Amino acid sequence: MNCEKNHYYAWADCVSPDLPPHGILNQVCSAVLRYRRHSPIEAMMRLGIIGLPNSGKTTIFNALTGSDYPAEPFSSGQLEVHTAVVSVPDERIDRLSAFFKPKKTTYASVTYSDIGGLDKGIGEGLSGPMRNELQQVDGFLHVIRAFEDEAVPHSQQTVDPIRDLHIIDGEFLLLDLIAVENRMARLTEERQKGKVENKQQAMAETALFERLHAHLEAECPLRDMTDLTPDEAKSLRGYGFLTLKPVLVIFNTGDSAADPA
């Protein structure tokens, strides 16, 4: 099976304090809205900032939220989260507010979560709280280290952005594959014990999860499945599959690299 691992890309000088939240969010917000198109509309969007240790994700988090957390590596495998809520600038709301002059103007907001503890091999033993934190977000900002600095060691010893991108992708694929296999095993058990109330629905769910399994085994993220019906996409929302969520990949080029574009 051939698949394209769809990501949205951006480059950032993580040293700059002027990283515009609305600039970073343009593409990923649109993708999140497509992801949530079969769910009730919510005013607040939740985005998880992820990356390997020393990738610069906490600096990105600070720039987006105006926070001042120290950029220190989290303990691998241990859930540590920084959270902040930020209003999203919207010129349309500004114009409406200026015209109607309401007593209060409320913007849409984004909750950012800087999720620490991800590293190579985490998919084999992810804790329940970390899994829950990852599942609760609507999309990911995946920060990839693309700068050299001997004073900041890399968890994989060398700087290789493509390798690092594949590490987290691979861990999320493994986690989703395990979740799909667990659900398939439960469906089989229920069928064997005669606990199936709606056989037609059970058969449809089994067929769907067999398709998910084949897709994941081919190392393709679920967001690349183009043959999901609206009803199927809606039914999968409750599982919190990580590779179903949209991803914006941010390459942290440091303060000296040229814009690769």
Image (cartoon, rainbow, N blue to C red):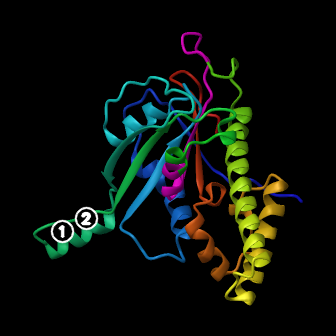
Q: Is mark 2 on a helix, strand or loop?
A: helix
Residue that mark 1 sits on: 98
Q: Does the magenta stretch include residue 147?
A: yes
- Specify the segment rendered in magenta: 132-153
- Quadrant in which the N terminus is drawn: bottom right
On the image, numbered disc 2 is attached to which residue? Answer: 94
In depth, the one of 108 and 222 nearer the eye is: 222
The percent position of residue 259, horizontal first and vertical second, equals 59, 33
- In the image, 251: left or right of 138? right
Q: Identify the residue shown where x is 69% and y is 45%.
A: 169
Q: Position of residue 64 (x, y in %)?
A: 38, 42
Three-letter amino acid code at the position of disc 2? Asp
Quarter of the figure with residue 260: top right
User: Which image quadrant for residue 84?
Assistant: top left
Q: Where is residue 68 in the image (x, y as percent from the top left)?
A: 31, 30
> Relative to the observer, which residue lies in front, 51 or 175?
175
Question: Is residue 162 toward the left or the right of residue 53 in the image?
Answer: right
Q: In which quarter of the image is the C terminus?
A: top right
Q: How far apart are marks 2 and 1 (CA)?
A: 6 Å
Left or right of 195 on screen, residue 203: right
Quick one: SS at disc 1? helix
> What is the residue that sits farthest to the front in this orientation?
193
Few, some or many residues within 10 Å of mark 2 (<14, 14–19, 20+): some
> Which of 244/64 is in front?
244
Q: In front here: 255 or 148?
A: 148
- For mark 1, does the 10 Å Cα neighbourhood hold few (<14), some (14 to 19), or many (20 or more) residues? few
Q: Are marks 2 and 1 in contact (CB under 8 Å)?
A: yes
